[in-house]
Amino acid sequence: MTNSLAEYRQLAKALAVDALALVPGPNFTRALGHSFMSHERPFVLIVHADLPPAAIVPNLELSSWDLVGFEGAVFDWRDQVGYSDAFAALAQHMPMQRLAVEGQVMRVFVHHALIQAMPKLEIIDAEAEISGLRMIKTEADIAALEAAISLSERALSRVLDSVQIGQTEKEIEGALIQALFAEGAEGLAFSPIVAAGPNSAMPHAHARDYRVQSGDALLFDFGGRKDGFAADITRTVFVGEVSDEGREVYNTVLAANLAGFEVTRAGVTAHAIDDVVTGVLEASPYGDRIRTKTGHGLGRDVHEAPYIMRGNHQILPAGTVYTNEPGLYEVGKFGVRIEDDVLITETGCRSLTQFPKDLMIVGR
């Protein structure tokens, strides 16, 4: 098990810190090969640059922790006593001066517990570096992503076959969730977005009791989970009929999406991809409807590095997976987004998403 922490030890050395601290979440799961809940109890894995690792583990989790095969010191604690003594024991066992943490994941009370036990400890936010280790996907990672995407696409196909004018967004959302689990999802990547008519112009809309009408854009942004990995797919269809404007907007978004594939290859920057994709939207008559960047990395987290936007000059290597999701949104009217999950290769890219992108009219 200790060997699986080697790259985290190397990162600690590269960052010139004594150790890295991981808490339950995607990096924690990747490091240990087991998933644990994040709750009100501190649960911390310390990967030292030179010494064996250590962990602070809630006593009630010890039976599950035994399955990890952890080769390091474990300091457990019970609710009735509290966790201060466990942090003090860690400080005595493994004195540290500089500790790198996941700035977007570690919670304030864990930070405070570390400082209370080690008042001179310097805590450094290394979110980008720690999470960056997940950016290049392994073959197993890609297989899990493909499984999550495939079941999600099958679920969408089921739902589109049953959409009817007069259904509410909430009813369609419920059918989508049921279909995801029926197709083998182990969980939801995130709460699905099912948005019709004016609601589709809100990039992160919530399903309402709104009843779908003829001519509405109907946007689905959703994904299932499989083997710890998340799908993230968006398709926009029209119900009953589509207006000329709706067709033009859809074709513009599709052109931007396809342009993203053309420019994607190993060695390209996130800036370059977004510049091309957004450039297609800007050159259209609907440039004032742009609300979002092109996309983001995808893996154990739905949103992770790299972030596909202008100004991010990060070079993207082969093995990176990102979402290509241009959209146009007219507030109070309708929105269109098309999202694919894209694997960068040495020679170009491969779409992990296979669901058709031709304009589709349903419910007629």
Image (cartoon, rainbow, N blue to C red):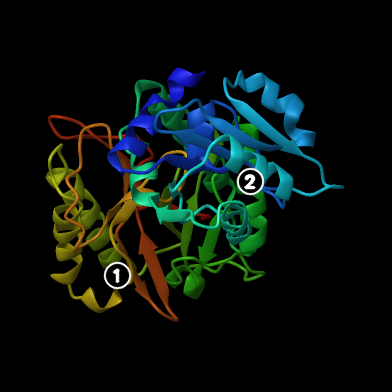
- Looking at the image, is 227 positioned above or below residue 203? above
Answer yes or no: do the residues labelled 2 and 1 have beta carbons within 8 Å? no
- Looking at the image, is 127 positioned above or below residue 330? above
Of 127 and 160, the residue lying toward us: 127
What percent of the width, then of the height, locates residue 181? 64, 36
Q: Is residue 206 visible?
A: yes
Of 122 and 314, the residue lying toward us: 122
Residue that mark 1 sits on: 244
Looking at the rendered structure, the kind of residue marked 1 is Asp
- Looking at the image, is 267 positioned above or below residue 331? above
Looking at the rendered structure, the kind of residue marked 2 is Ile
What percent of the width, then of the height, locates residue 259? 16, 51
The quadrant in which residue 29 appears is top right
Rounded to the nearest angstrom, the CA distance separating label 2 from label 1 is 32 Å
Please identify the residue farthest to the bottom as the structure is shown: 332
Of 200 and 57, the residue lying toward us: 57
Residue that mark 2 sits on: 177
**Residue in the picture at 45% in, 34% down:** 48
What percent of the width, then of the height, locates residue 203? 44, 67
The quadrant in which residue 280 appears is bottom left
Other-residue count near label 2 (Cα within 10 Å), few / some / many at <14 / 14–19 / ≥20: many
What percent of the width, then of the height, locates residue 161? 54, 44
Q: Is residue 148 visible?
A: no
The local secondary structure at tag 1 comes to: helix
**Residue in the picture at 58% in, 66% down:** 206
**Residue in the picture at 79% in, 35% down:** 60
- Looking at the image, is 291 positioned above or below residue 256? below
The quadrant in which residue 246 appears is bottom left
